[in-house]
Amino acid sequence: MDDKTTPSPESEETASEEALTQMSRPSVVAIVGRPNVGKSTLFNKFYGKRKAIVHDLPGVTRDRNTATCSYKDRSFTLIDTGGLDFETEETEEIAFRNQSKKAVSEADLLLFLTDAREGLTPADREVFDFIRSHGKPVYLVVNKTEGNGASQLNDFYQLGVTLYPISAEHNLGLSDLLDALYRDLLPCDTEHEELQMRGAEDCIPKIVVLGRPNVGKSTLVNTLLQEDRMVTGSTPGTTRDAIDTTVLYQGKQYIFIDTAGIRKRGKVIYGVEQYSVGRSKEALNRADIALLLLDGVEGVTEQDTKIAGMILSACRGVILLVNKVDILKEEKKAFLEGQMDRYFPFLKYAKKLEIHYISARTGEGVSEIFEKAQRIYERFSARISTGDLNRFFEKCIDAQPPPTVRSGRRTRLYYITQALTSPPTFIVFSNTLDIPDFYIQYIENRLREKFGFAGVPIRIKLREKKGDADRR
Ligand code: GDP
Ligand code: GDP
């Protein structure tokens, strides 16, 4: 296929890049402070309702709770950390402390919570020095200031930063605090209406791990959620006992769907498929991206192609993961890639780019999954401006005009617009619906090249629009 449309002026390239990155993630706000200052109470007030801490995955959610909160037209991810206590040396406290330190380094904004009734303690000063050293905006929030609690406030002025007196329990000072916080929150999406419609959580990539039995799904999920990545919370999925797990990796959040189902599967008797097709479909429908896990040693099987078909018809982003690279012979890779080309229809959009070799057991290649998923998600949920699209579209048509249709009439393509995101869905307005598939495929290929849609399904629909010449 000719390539005349690919080169384009630099400014246009920049504009479409900008369009693709407009969808930024919500700010991460962490509440930090000594135990008992009222962090959980404040968390619940901001969240607006009581949120149960889910203890389903031992050792990962016990000390941490997250919620997506909205204020005016912005949303943020709130993390309630475990206590930051620099004095105690108990092992459990040390674990809490390590988790809290991670929260501080991963958050964008820090609410440093203190207790007016206890005044400014040496431990508070230590925590304050620690969190200030990260150079992030810190809000000094003094809690429990209702009644005569306010009399201790003088102490806190010594810290030399703006002070926000509140009473979490009695709802005092919370809106002033939120107003101040609001100024530092990232706009999550320039199209607020759409954001509100879809819910703030839609700024976080949702990922599902799929594969036939014994390819290594539960090993992978355990590696993905391993200790040193910050697991920030769990929320129930729609299926009974499904648990979604939120992970913060290098400042970005990811939701892994139905992790409990997959983990449990790991314990199931060899060869018995209990993780039902229905359950996989349900998980896939809620996901943006599927990780299709293959066993590199065994190669592609019929069952793998069925799962691939499921992903294709659900129209999700995809990353092909070839597992067990630790015991895979180098020579086998070319053979496997040939198999994948043959058997996986979506390779036309996943391309070799999205075939990734990993070892779920040793962890090799596993952290790159996050970066790949992020990149696919950005494209999957991006909206390209109609201006950028049509500058592209004009060149695309000039380089290869549409064929004359059967009736002998000249085909006119008027313009293109993106109607939906996730997956990106484009509508081409034309004077006829009689346009051959190969031409639609040509437009798709050009769109993929221009806007970087590797690993992302896109849809193109035709809509008929009568031009002046046709009406006469
Ligand atoms: P955390 O350990 O920092 O998460 O603290 P909690 O939220 O569990 O609160 C510790 C204690 O402080 C609880 O008994 C709360 O009821 C109490 N508390 C929280 N906020 C206030 C407040 O505004 N005023 C008063 N007087 N007590 C509060
Ligand atoms: P699942 O049924 O897809 O959840 O698969 P499991 O995670 O239970 O793994 C099936 C088998 O493959 C187990 O014996 C794992 O130890 C093994 N396995 C998983 N990942 C790897 C890997 O990266 N390398 C090797 N050599 N074995 C692995």
Image (cartoon, rainbow, N blue to C red):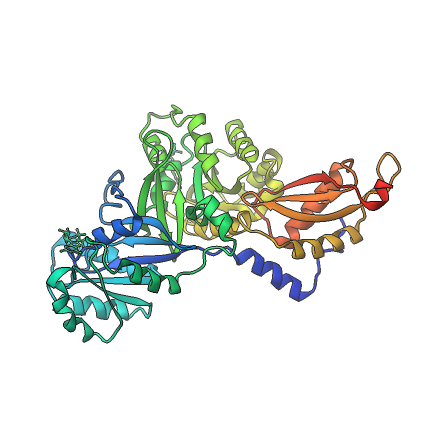
On the rendered structure, is 420 left or right of 397? left
Frontmost residue, 199 versus 25: 199
**Quarter-of-image position of residue 18:** bottom right
Above or below: residue 200 compared with residue 265: below
On the rendered structure, is 34 left or right of 457? left
Above or below: residue 171 compared with residue 327: below
Q: Residue at x 29, y 67 (%)?
A: 138
Q: Residue at x 22, y 68 (%)?
A: 128
Above or below: residue 257 compared with residue 185: above
Residue 283: horizontal and vertical position, in percent? 43, 34
Quarter placement of the C terminus: top right
Residue 193 visible, this angle:
yes
Residue 369: horizontal and vertical position, in percent? 45, 49
On the rendered structure, is 183 left or right of 51? right
User: For the view shown, which residue lies furthest in the top direction?
Assistant: 272
User: For the view shown, which residue lies furthest in the right direction?
Assistant: 408
**Quarter-of-image position of residue 25:** bottom left
Image mark count: 0
Residue 454: horizontal and vertical position, in percent? 58, 48
Q: Quadrant of ligand 2?
A: top left
Residue 193: horizontal and vertical position, in percent? 50, 50
Residue 297 visible, this angle:
no
Q: Residue at x 65, y 66 (%)?
A: 11
Frontmost residue, 231 versus 354: 231
On the rendered structure, is 388 left or right of 60? right
